[in-house]
Image: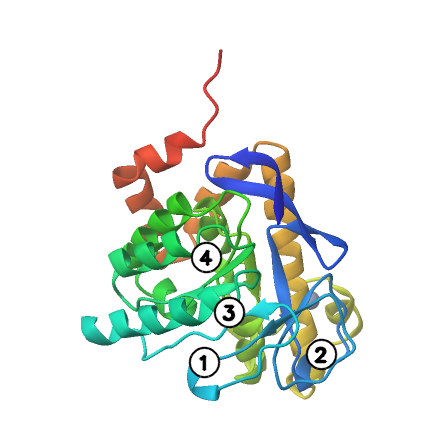
Amino acid sequence: MLEILAHNGPARLGVWHYADKKIPTPNFLLNITPATSRLKHEVYIAPHWVRTSRGPLVVHYGTLAGSAKIGRFGILPGASFGFDIARELAELGVEKTLALAERYPEYGAIIEGGKYPDLRESAARQLASRSLLTIASGARLCQRPRLLVEVLTRVREVINPNTALYLPGAPTALLPVLVYMGVDLFDTSYAIRAALRGSYITASESYPIARLKELPCTCEVCAKNDGEKLQNNLHLLVKHNINVLRGVMAEIRESIRTGRFTKLVEMSANASTQAMAALRILYREKYEFLEKYTPIAP
Ligand SMILES: [Zn+2]
């Protein structure tokens, strides 16, 4: 479970007690792929068919259609029929996902429900006490700020405060505002996909590596190599992109620790129209959600 050390609004600084390890949160799960095989991190995630000795590992069992055999701890399969789908299909997806989850009460689970916040909320309610919950179609939600805010605020309010909430696929510029809504865990899929299409990311931007005259980063990759080397070596570009993610997470944690998190959220929102839109909706319409977690001065 997640131990909460400090709040800044609904944002949580915590320690995730997982597989005998103590993982600082907010954090990201490092996806084990051929492009990340040499990278080290505090916690990994991989689909159930990947054989690895890396740990601690969260196994991700994919979708129900894959009929995976459930073994070690992980995120149970979801019945996903897509995101922008008819309500009946989304309802069926939730129903089938919950039916399987009932058989494995100790496992992590997926909150399905497509684009319907009330379905997401009722799914979350029934999975409320799990130690780890995943928001399905995270990347799609991040493109729709209003829906993103509705889903996350409603889900966070009904689940256990000590449940670690995981949103896969989020772009880097949105991470602070997502943490502000109570997300604890992310992944590296955005950073890896960016590298695969030749993009070099910073905390707020994404640049085509072929057009960069200078590398605006001093991580160990960028200190030792130039743009041309990164352009010709996917491992180096992935490593830099993930280093950026590592830095963003450390800054988020440090800003919650020192009470400067809201300032970080506002500054980062300037760099992303989706983050700005989400923050505006939070300020204008979700005052109670934000207020609930703000300690009242005596
Ligand atoms: Zn770098």
**Residue 49 pos. (x, y %):** 62, 86
Q: Earlier in the sequence, mark 3 or mark 1?
A: 1
Name the mark nearer the viewer: 3 or 4: 4
User: Residue visible at 62% across and 53% down?
Assistant: 249
Judged from the image, the secondary structure of the residue bearing numbered disc 1 is loop
Residue 84 visible from this viewpoint: no
The part of the image, by quadrant, that contains residue 122 is: bottom left
Name the mark nearer the viewer: 3 or 1: 1
Q: Residue furthest front?
A: 103
How far is the residue under mark 2 from the one under mark 3? 16 Å
Residue 288 visible from this viewpoint: yes
The part of the image, by quadrant, that contains residue 139 is: bottom left
Question: Residue flagged by tag 2: what amino acid is it?
Answer: Leu
Q: Which residue is mark 4?
A: 174
203 relative to 99 in the view: left or right: right
Q: Which residue is mark 2?
A: 236
Q: Residue furthest top?
A: 298
Q: Residues within 10 Å of mark 1 (few under 14, many from 20)?
A: some
**Residue 26 pos. (x, y %):** 59, 51
Name the mark nearer the viewer: 1 or 4: 1
How far is the residue under mark 3 from the one under mark 1? 31 Å
Mark 2 vs 3: CB contact within 8 A: no
Q: Is residue 250 above or below residue 116?
A: above
User: Residue visible at 30% across and 63% down?
Assistant: 144
10 relative to 283 in the view: left or right: right
Q: Residues within 10 Å of mark 4 (few under 14, many from 20)?
A: many
Question: Residue flagged by tag 4: what amino acid is it?
Answer: Leu
Instruction: Decide which of 35, 49 is in the foreground and name it.
Output: 49
Judged from the image, the secondary structure of the residue bearing numbered disc 4 is helix
Q: Which residue is mark 3?
A: 206
Mark 3 vs 4: CB contact within 8 A: no
Q: Which residue is mark 1?
A: 63
